[in-house]
Image (cartoon, rainbow, N blue to C red):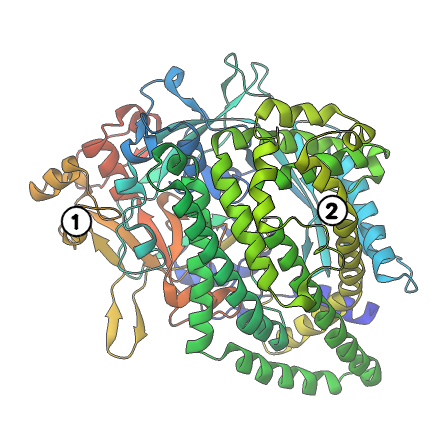
Amino acid sequence: MHRLRSLAVLSIMLFNSQTSIADEGQWQPYQLPELKAELKRLGIAIPAEKLADLKKHPMSAIISLGGCSASFVSDAGLVVTNHHCAYGAIQRNSNATRNLIADGFLAKSKAEELPAGPNERIYITDQVDNVTQQVVGDLSANLSGRERHEAIQKRIKKLIQECEQDKAFRCSVPSFHRGLEYFRIRQLLIRDVRLVYAPSDKIGTFGGEVDNFEWPRHTGDFAFLRAYVGKDGRPADPSPSNVPYHSKDFLRVSAEGLKNGDPILLAGYPGRTSRYKLASEIRFARDVSYPRRVEESTADVATINGATKDDAEAAVRYASVVKGINNGLKKTQGLLDGFARKDIAAIKDSQYAMFRNWLAQQKNSAENQSLLKELDEVVAADMALSEQEFAWAVANTSDLLRSARTLYRLALEQKKPDAERESGFQERDIPFIKARLTRLEQSLVVKVDQARWTAALQRYAKLPAATHPAGLDALLPSADQAAAMIAASQLAQTANRLAYLDKPADNFQSASDAMIALAIKLQPIEMALENQRKEVDGNLEKVIPRYMAAVIAWKKSQGKPVYADANSTLRVTYGTVAPYTPRDGISKGPFTSVEGILEKQSNSAPFEVPPALVDAVKAQRFGIFRDATLGTVPVNFLSSADTTGGNSGSAVLNKNAELVGLNFDSTYESVTKDWYFDAPITRAIHVDIRYMLWVMQEIDHADNVLKEMQIRYPSNTKKRTH
């Protein structure tokens, strides 16, 4: 085991540009100096060593929103991200009579900026340390899976506690290469986030779910937020007395744009990829997990739509929920279609056979063969347990029930010393729990929650009996009883939910609320599942790192890229503006234009177009944003950059590290890149900065926001800096 781990570390240390193929790779910043030759060949002018420094431009301007990416674009905490990443903030401030989703929003002054919501956060990564030895060093080989997992978690919590002595920071210790390495990441956590500007959804989500993951695309998927802090410059709870955060660095904007073949860098926080998983895991996703997920999401959206029909207020409250489910649904369906188009499992089979042959030629062959047998066993156990976890999630499709379970679990955990509580229920987590409970005030309608849970319980009953967690069926209400339980619960009121935060566990036992009572009954089932998960995860954490060490050494021997799967940490990828051929006889260019918006225009969503935009295009009021080659304003463009979910809002940079666009999607054919990077058809979709600036200037007259940014305009026009 130690020999294989040494091989893996050596492979990363010796990694050089010869290992790069195509534009594959979601690189940790510290790896970029080893890509120096590749970046130079591509045409990137900014030194790789500078890109690797989190405290220098441009990486110091790249931030996370906790699920999306973003970047600072002024020294007064102005943040640019995707419209769909700010959608929750837009929805929170909307209602049937003041619908900011449909109408858009622009604060003409800082005083007019709106609270983004209690659960909105900005994370600024400022330090990353390798803590692998502190997490897994010297763990006894005799530990059970659960004991191993709990030992690892205990060490991680200690590292986090040490890191968070300064309460301005939020720390985490994610694993890389499936548990081979651990890095401690420190992030400044800003808790006061406000909505500055968002165009109408007729621009920000133009094309809706019809165009989602499709090309050509014509979506102005951008919005602006602002970070606020206390007068002392440190993060503070939302308050009218707070002041804009002074961002020590921010991205400059280039309105010169790009052309086909130009190099780009992309920096952000990609969510999850699975490129090192086994063929058996792919087949499980393809044949079991993803089809069930598609069926479940489709049914849940249909239920919500039915329950909010003819109720404008309810529809606004659930707009963000539906949008999120639909986005995941289309991606999952795209994965299934991609698996049907190309047998990725068969490709993995072939690769795995070559790996096994290579491994058989290494020293300790018998030990290596035992490793592969253990690998198959732990992966099979993981897949079996995930089916029960899916059924459990379906049975709990109620915001009120999930709230009751969270509150009761927190009360139980608070009986323990803080260091011994489960992650997610420590003192550091209570503000996040409170924010989630408060957020329901803008995203919960009792009749909708009733409809969702009733329908979900019916779907749960139809799942294979073997997937039902032991003992759960006897505790769940019938579908007929579910609506009455929710109606009788007092948790629909925010004050009542928050009141339980301060109650000890004993008080829950005497509570008369039906949802609290059910949460108490379900607690043993939840704990049984959680303990099974700990056992499985501990076994995975013992076997998978040994496997990954061997895989990395094998890949290095072939000169192939060595990068960790995405795990919501800061990464950099690169590529070029590029067309693609999705199928024989069809070639799709890398740019779309504003004329395409009018070609798609209709009188109904999702292809309605604001009259001001129609007029501006017809009159060709393009000004300095007219592309010389296209003869018009470009809207979206394609690149070969390696992205995934979480990269939404990622800054797209030109060779000089100037902001030229925002990532917001992938082509439908590219969705399977989460599992397998297929260079010829893998394309990311970005909103062109020139379209953003044109909309801001010509359509929404967001002059105050334009003036706040530093913008470099084309050299053939009168030079201006807003």
Q: Position of residue 352 (x, y in %)?
A: 63, 81
The answer to which quarter of the image holds residue 426 is top right
In x, y percent, where is residue 48? 51, 52
Q: Quadrant of residue 18?
A: bottom right
Q: From the image, tell me which residue sits under label 2.
A: 522
Name the residue rendered at 63%, 58% in the picture.
391
Callout 1 crowding tier (Cα within 10 Å): few <14, some 14–19, many ≥20? few
Residue type at tag 1:
Ser
Give 722 or 564, whichever is nearer the viewer: 564
Q: Nearer the viewer, residue 32 or 166?
A: 166
In the depicted view, which residue is nearer to us: 316 or 599?
316
Q: What amino acid is at disc 2? A: Leu
Residue depth check, mark 1 versus mark 2: number of the one nearer the observer: 2
> Is residue 292 shown above or below 513?
below
Residue 440 placement, left or right of 523 = left
Q: Is residue 718 above or below residue 374?
A: above
Of the pair 280 and 452, the residue shown nearer to us:
452
Residue 356: x and y, percent?
A: 69, 84
Q: Earlier in the sequence, mark 1 or mark 2?
A: 2
In the image, which disc is placed on residue 602?
1
Residue 131, visible in the rendered structure: no
In percent of the image, x 44 and y 77: which residue is there?
A: 340
Q: Is residue 524 visible?
A: yes
